Amino acid sequence: MSTENPSRPSEEEVRAGAAGYGRAVLASYDLFVLGLVCRMVWRCPRGRMLELYDRNVGARHLDLGPGSGFFLDRCSYPVADPRLTLLDLNEDVLAKTGRRLARFSPVLLSRDVLEPLELGEARFDSAGLNFLLHCLPGGLAHKSSVFDHAAEYVRAGGRIFGSTVLALGVEHGRLAPRALESLNEDRTMSNAEDSLEELDAEMARRFADYRITVRGSVALFEATV
């Protein structure tokens, strides 16, 4: 697996990407971002991402940047009592998802996913990185290190999966270019140079078995560790 870590962003940039998901944003996230923006702007209905979870989520699941917990709340687990561990720098995200998924008693951990995760002996059947990469600062060559950090704790044969909005190499609808410009300006996203070609290259360097599916502006990816 790759160990390169070029052009490291500052701590301020890392925290800026996490800070965009405050209580007000999280309160409307399911309806506005996942319901409206995904469908109308990125042209990737949230159902596609739910299908991604249904195909790949395991009994012991690690989720990096769980957002509002929408997909973890609704996906089909292979067991009745999945063990969930959720990582995020944003305490509002952890509080929101912790309440929503309380029936599973999830483990909630504050972590910078661009750093080693320090999860000890924990091992998982799957790891989710949904709508995470486009929020992380730096280029894809740097932020793809999150694949390495997650894979360290996924058992052999387990799954890593997720999605990200790309700026280059995909066919945008008419609303996407302005949205990308605005979201990168205010640092809600950091993906102005993220391309399908580079995402494919970064995954190919790490996984022998992987797949990327493009839907509108979004790349949905899944790989076997």
Image (cartoon, rainbow, N blue to C red):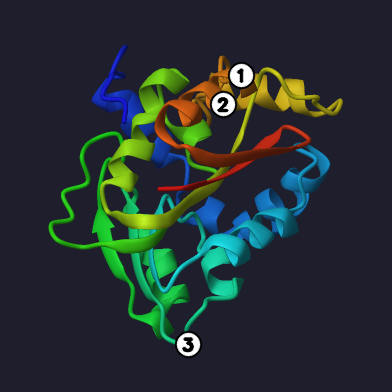
In the image, farthest residue toward the right: 174
**Amino acid type at mark 2:** Asp
State which quadrant residue 193 falls in: top right
Tell whether label 1 touches label 3 (CB within 8 Å). no
Q: CA distance from mark 3 to mark 2?
A: 34 Å
Disc with the residue nearer the chain's start (3 vs 2): 3
Please give the name of the residue rendered at 61% of the width and 66% of the height, measured from the top-left corner.
Answer: 54
Question: Regarding mark 2 in the picture, which secondary structure is present there?
Answer: helix
Side (left or right) of 66 relative to 8: right
Amino acid under label 1? Answer: Glu
Q: Is residue 197 above or below residue 223?
A: above
38 lies above or below 76: above
Q: Which residue is mark 2?
A: 200
Disc number placed over residue 80 in the picture, else none: 3
Q: Secondary structure at mark 3?
A: loop
**Other-residue count near label 3 (Cα within 10 Å), few / some / many at <14 / 14–19 / ≥20:** few
- Mark seen at residue 197: 1
Decide: is 5 above or below 175.
Answer: above
